[in-house]
Image: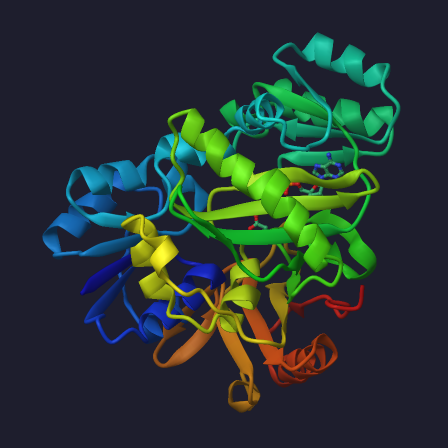
Amino acid sequence: MNVMIIGGGGREHVITKYISRNPRVTKVYALPGNGGISQYAECVKISAEDIEGIVNFAKTHAIDFAIVAPDDPLALGAVDKLEAEGIKCFGPTQEAAKIESSKIFAKELMTKYNIPTAKYKVFSSIDDALSHAATSDCPIVIKADGLAKGKGVTVAENFKEARDAIIACMKNKTFGKSGENILIEECLKGPEVTVLAFTDGKTIIPMISSMDHKRAYDGDKGPNTGGMGVVAPNKYYTPEIADYCMKKIFVPTINALNSEGRKFKGCLYFGLMLTQDGPKVIEYNCRFGDPEAEAVLPLLESDLLDIMLAVRDERLNEVNVKFKDGASCCVVLASHGYPMLYLTGYEINFGEAESLPGVEIFHAGTKLEDGKFFTAGGRVLAVNAVSDDLASAREKAYEAVSMINFEGMSYRTDIGTK
Ligand code: AMP
Ligand code: GLY
């Protein structure tokens, strides 16, 4: 079987590594892939947003199965176009991906189907948005409607911050069309939990819960990033809460999407906040989280490709999706300056880190040249350790981190201490 994976970060590295283990796989291509992924796949210089290029490549390389991992190609309809050419895909259609690509759509869906979420208002006029913000009690949350590379949300502590965020979206067009319409939401409080779930639109199977660390610096300080580390499972997510979420959030979301004629097949990401009034949805993503995938998938015991094929063919109910006992701790190593300006092109020394038992190093932004790895992105590596419990997973992950170095290497030292 020839498999193609779209994307080139740590998430795509873990997926590529694990699907390569399936004996049915003969060849894997990654578009565009990265240095680490090139150990398991042939990397092809086609961008994840070049849908025409992706479809042409698939047609000329006898691709049997495509995994579309990032949000942009999903929102651009990569799955629809590949499936129209007879290429089976893991990932939602453009219509179903709207649950991530429009936050207003997601909110309206939750309201219509009684799925718990923060109270909100939609604005298409900057004056209305500013006057609403001026009369609201802070903190309030300002969100651009569309995709914004993880930067479209501002938790505003005061009116000035709210005003700056509204002006950035609606006047300065920092996020282009994505910020033409915005949401202003009530600010929720409580521990955050990520739950990734496999679904074929009929069956939904949640994976082990996790906790992302979105802020750049220790103590949840500094700007938001794509994610600086993850632990799984998330200790706040008790079996009782999981049961509640299944009944009140996960199943109702799948049913709601079906009722709207937007059947979702792929990985659905639930960003939840455990408030005093119960769990509420903060956001949906239409894909695996990054770096959540690098912490959660190492705990998966079942074969990833078999699950993905079952999702595509709507027979997820026939597969046994099993997770290992134990815990993961994943620490992201970034380039100095990330998520703002940073330099790349520095050689990475791994020391003995890769030989530590339970440790896996996923490449987020690297390139391979003459047998050596160099930095090539803001997030460079995701170092994950699996162990019997979180404390020992954390110890192992940081032991591995201490063996790695590159110029400007930056990371949080407090992943998994919350
Ligand atoms: P998102 O880009 O949607 O993942 O949002 C980024 C972060 O903003 C989330 O992980 C939360 O920490 C925070 N956030 C988003 N919406 C809310 C809300 N309604 N209340 C409190 N925090 C929020
Ligand atoms: N780590 C958050 C995300 O993938 O959206």
Tell me where residue 244 appears, x and y as whole percent: 67, 46
Tell me where residue 415 appears, x and y as whole percent: 73, 67
Tell me where residue 70 appears, x and y as whole percent: 43, 48
Q: Which colour scheme is used?
A: rainbow
Which residue appears at 29% of the width and 69% of the height?
41
* Whether residue 5 is visible: no
* Whether residue 66 is visible: yes
Reply above or below: 87 against 308.
Answer: above
Is residue 36 rendered to the left or right of residue 161?
left
Tell me where residue 372 appears, x and y as whole percent: 41, 79
Give the number of callouts.
Answer: 0
Quadrant of the picture in which ligand 1 is shown: top right
Which residue appears at 37% of the width and 26% of the height?
261
Is residue 306 rendered to the left or right of residue 353?
left
Residue 42, quarter of the rendered image: bottom left
Residue 373, quarter of the rendered image: bottom left
Is residue 61 rendered to the left or right of residue 122?
left
Nearest to the observer: residue 205 or residue 40: 205
Reply above or below: 317 against 130.
Answer: below
Nearest to the observer: residue 193 or residue 406: 193
